[in-house]
Image (cartoon, grey):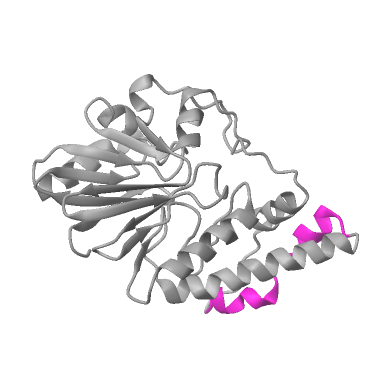
Amino acid sequence: MRGNITLIQIHVPQDVFHIAVLSGPEGYLLVDHPEAIGNPLVQKALDDMGKRPVKFLLNTHWHYDHVGGNEIYGPDAIIIAQENVRKRLMTKQTPAWSPTPIGPYPERAWPRITFRDSLTLHFDGEDIEMDHYANGHTDGDSVVYFAQANVLDVGDIYDSKGGLAGGVDMEGIARSLSAVLERINDDTIIITGHSRLSNRGELAMYLPLLQQTIAHVRQEISAGKSEKEIVDEGLPEAWKPWFAPGDIPVDRDFMHQIYATLTHTSSLDQ
């Protein structure tokens, strides 16, 4: 993709998973890993690049489709994540979107190095920085900067053009994306968790739309409108350029998550 950074895409029915790989003489550093069932595909892709050990595995958040490699590589690789990821993996989670509880994970899957706000790692000729700006998609989100390659992995706090990324704190997502936008330049490649690669221009289009929609929902709440009324209105017309040439989709979850954030009814157990 650029420099020593490679993107592995794992295709499963109805979804795509992205793994950022930093490769060099010391071995591999991975950012995220899909469910463990996808590991044979991941390992084959790594072996095709050269049979080197996985030395580091970074988790952008605790969701099962991003930590599926922890148990596999944990005994030998060093897992690094924001401190709340470790807390989530150590205990049973009951998110609303899962029909069955998740975890606790075995100890070998727990991050061995954690941080609260920021951490920097120097490996294979790269300076890698992990930053937790705010609770957003989860309470343990990290964005991962590769300084030399000018590549950024945002996990699930942002999708490329035409996509919507939600979470437990939509204002937190907006704050995180504001910090990202200030940090990157027009040459930065943005890796998303599941959608295609993006860039600063697209993020600069998306962020104001998110901020305007948050302000709109806040105004509607102040006017006395119910959650159902606000959600049924759907996305404002201002989103049209983001989805062009297609139509603005009906996305009740996105509007619901904004409403829940502003009324403090969202749960961090997501």
Q: Residue at x 59, y 29 (%)?
A: 94
Farthest residue to the right: give it: 224
Where in the figure is residue 207, as x and y percent of width and height? 56, 69
Magenta highlight on residue 232: yes
Q: Give the left or right position of residue 53, taking residue 244 as reference.
A: left
Q: Give the number of callouts.
A: 0
Please identify the quadrant where the N terminus is shown. bottom left
Picture layout, residue 240 above or below residue 104: below
Q: Give x and y (percent) for residue 130.
A: 38, 50
Q: Nearer the viewer, residue 200 or 230?
A: 200
Nearer-the-camera pick, 17 or 250:
17
* Percent coordinates x, y for residue 238 in the rendering: 66, 77
Quadrant including the C terminus: top right
Q: Is residue 239 above or below residue 128?
A: below
* Left or right: residue 234 compared with residue 142: right
In percent of width and height, residue 233 lies at: 77, 65
Residue at 58% x, 53% y is: 166
Q: Residue at x 55, y 42 (%)?
A: 139
Between residue 69 and residue 61, name the one nearer to us: 61
Q: Is residue 248 visible?
A: no
Q: Is residue 63 above or below residue 150?
A: above
* Residue 34 in which image quadrant: top left
Visible residue check, residue 55: yes
**Magenta residues: mostly which secondary structure?**
helix
Among the 4 quarters of the image, the one containing residue 217: bottom right
Confirm whether the magenta stretch covers residue 151.
Answer: no
User: At 17% from the left edge and 58% from the top edge, which residue is drawn?
Assistant: 4
- Magenta residues, as a range? 225-244
Please state if 102 lies on the left or on the right of 192 as rendered. right
